Image (cartoon, rainbow, N blue to C red):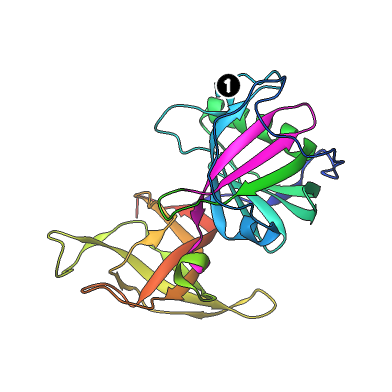
Amino acid sequence: MKFRWTWCLPLVASMTLAACGTTSGGGAGKPGPSGPTGPAGDAASLTAYHWKLQQAYTPAGNEDQSWFLSSSQAPIELDFVDQRVVVKNLCNVISSAYSIEGQRINLQRGMSTLRACNDNQLMMLEQQVARILPTAKQWNVQLGGSAAEQPRLTLQFIDGTRWQLNGKPTAQTQYGSAPERIFLEVAPERKACSHGVIKDYQCLQVREIRYGDNGVKTYTGQWENFYSEIEGYKHEAGVSNVLRINRFKRQNVPADASSYVYVLDMVVSSAIADKRK
């Protein structure tokens, strides 16, 4: 197998930030779009949602499309997990420890995976994100006033740049319980399997892996059909992956559905299958 390499590096800049007073609107006297009508969220609300960038504004208050690529490219996503903010949907995953003091947000020195990226535009966007993140200074969450209204996170940066991100409940928020963490190795190819409700279904091939406290692999299970999907994981034919998974127990199991929900937490490693074998 040919391996894709992934490791972590400190970001060049320290992510310790200053703060100013809370502001709102579009900047330079220009109002932004109206937000949700619900109450303001506290710091815990940051961790309750996946935050996807919907709109961005320049320091002058004009809409800024430089933070978005084509409509087929998923927008920048922020997750606040275990006192770290994780930036997704770039070439690499950027993460940084953070702390909250009122409406002020402080980011410490960050870490980033480092892997090859064939998309030059996406790589440039990643560099742009890495430069501005250390300058974030304040945050505000406005919760939806109804079930149909998404919460909104507003992040403002020192230079006046402003992001507005819409929230989608995390699995833990949605399923109301702490997950069980497991590791699954996913084979390079799917295989036909009898699903019951889906004709001509192609199952992922997976096997469980367990590690000791020292990180050494202690158990490798047998390959088997995986009849569910893994939220947040997009399988690429010809590539095997070891995944860190959060497994949630469903409270009300729909007919013909698994009693568990599997949510991708992290891609531990990837390997390209050698087709000569």
- Regarding residue 1, the answer to whether it shows in the image is no
Q: Is residue 91 magenta?
A: no
Q: Nearer the viewer, residue 99 or 202?
A: 99
Specify the principal SS of the magenta part: strand
**Residue 215 point in image, percent of width and height:** 66, 73
Looking at the image, residue 83 sits to the left or right of residue 269; the answer is right
Residue that badge 1 annotates: 63
- Regarding residue 250, the answer to whether it shows in the image is yes
**Residue 172 point in image, percent of width and height:** 52, 68
Quadrant for the C terminus in the image:
bottom left
Looking at the image, residue 267 sits to the left or right of residue 198; the answer is right
Assess disc 1: are there few (<14), some (14-19) or many (≥20) residues with their C-alpha within 10 Å of its C-alpha: some
Write the residue at 77% across / 53% down. Answer: 98
Q: Is residue 153 magenta?
A: yes
Looking at the image, residue 136 sits to the left or right of residue 25; the answer is right
Looking at the image, residue 9 sits to the left or right of residue 126; the answer is right
Q: Nearer the viewer, residue 27 or 130?
A: 27
Can you say whether 221 is above or below 129 in the image?
below
Q: Nearer the viewer, residue 158 or 206?
A: 158
**Residue 38 point in image, percent of width and height:** 55, 51
Which residues make up the magenta segment? Answer: 150-172
Element on which disc 1 rests: loop
Write the residue at 49% across / 27% down. Answer: 69
Can you say whether 260 is above or below 174 in the image?
below
Write the residue at 70% across / 24% down. Answer: 27
Q: Residue furthest left?
A: 199
Q: Mark 1 belongs to which amino acid? A: Glu
Q: Nearer the viewer, residue 20 or 171?
A: 20
